[in-house]
Image (cartoon, grey):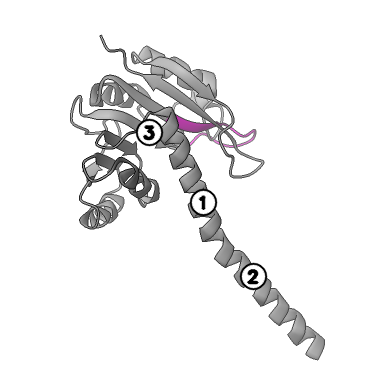
């Protein structure tokens, strides 16, 4: 019985170490991504940025700190509960504005953004043509868009309502590029070295620009 008790305590100790380590690793990963986005999208203080599908707003908050109080970060979500959470976040960060998006529109003000980014969101879009048009309209001339997504893992299913040409959960890089260029974007850079969450995720970044004229 004593051996069992010692093993159980050891197991619980190891488990707690793992649980405590996850938030630290996760936060560090967010910071790494934010640093990379800031470089690719040429962020500077005082600009206007938007995050599409901001979730809990962890990256939004990092972006808001990066561009400073004179800048602005729009954080969009479709789920009203997520929007409410982002509104609470904005109460403590005046340069963050929560936006209720829809299935075919970001609902961002036209020509308002110097840059827009989304992370593992695009492959969930059910109406990508309309959403891409909305993204294009929301950017200022010369503004940049970063789409971070993943090639579909073999054997996975396309999410409900998403175009079937994805071939699984994710979106092939070439299909993403074709859709963005069809909306008027010009591909500026492809980053195939984006940090992967694990061996099952082939994550990449596509950086586009809205032509100045």
> Label 1 near label 3: C-beta < 8 Å?
no
Q: Tell me the residue at 47%/47% (across/down).
A: 30
Q: Viewer-proximal residue, 125 or 112?
A: 112
Res. 62 mark = none
User: Percent from the top left, x then y, of residue 159?
Assistant: 47, 37
Q: Which residues are magenta?
A: 147-159
Q: In the shown orientation, is residue 103 left or right of residue 190?
A: left
Which numbered disc flags the more N-terminal residue, 3 or 1?
A: 1
**Which quadrant holds the C terminus?**
top left
* Residue occupied by mark 2: 15
Labels 3, 1: front one: 1
* Residue occupied by mark 3: 117
> Label 2 near label 1: C-beta < 8 Å?
no
Name the residue at the bottom extreme. Answer: 1
Q: Which secondary structure dominates the residues rendered in magenta?
A: loop
Q: Viewer-proximal residue, 121 or 160?
A: 121
* Residue occupied by mark 1: 28
User: Percent from the top left, x then y, of residue 95?
Assistant: 22, 46
Q: Tell me the residue at 78%/84% (across/down).
A: 4
Q: Tell me the residue at 44%/26% (across/down).
A: 163
Label 3 packing within 10 angstroms: few (<14), some (14-19), many (20+): many
Q: Is residue 161 above or below residue 213?
A: below
């Amino acid at each position: 019985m004593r051996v069992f008790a010692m093993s159980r305590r050891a197991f619980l100790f190891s488990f707690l170490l793992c649980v405590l380590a996850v938030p630290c690793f996760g936060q560090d990963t967010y910071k790494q991504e934010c640093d990379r986005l800031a470089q690719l999208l040429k962020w500077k203080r005082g600009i206007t940025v938007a995050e599409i599908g901001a979730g809990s707003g962890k990256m939004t908050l990092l972006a808001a700190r990066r561009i400073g109080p004179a800048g602005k970060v729009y954080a969009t979500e479709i789920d009203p509960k997520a929007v409410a959470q982002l509104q609470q976040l904005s109460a403590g960060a005046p340069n963050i504005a929560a936006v209720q998006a829809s299935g075919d529109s970001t609902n961002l003000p036209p020509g308002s953004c110097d840059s827009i980014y989304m992370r593992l969101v695009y492959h969930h879009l059910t109406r990508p043509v309309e959403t891409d048009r909305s993204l294009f309209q929301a950017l200022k001339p010369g503004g940049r868009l970063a789409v971070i997504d993943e090639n579909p893992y073999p054997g996975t299913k396309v999410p409900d309502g998403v175009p079937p040409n994805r071939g699984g959960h994710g979106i092939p890089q070439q299909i993403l590029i074709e859709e963005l260029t069809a909306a008027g974007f010009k591909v500026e850079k492809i980053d195939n070295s984006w940090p992967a969450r694990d061996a099952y995720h082939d994550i990449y970044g596509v950086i586009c620009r809205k032509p100045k004229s």
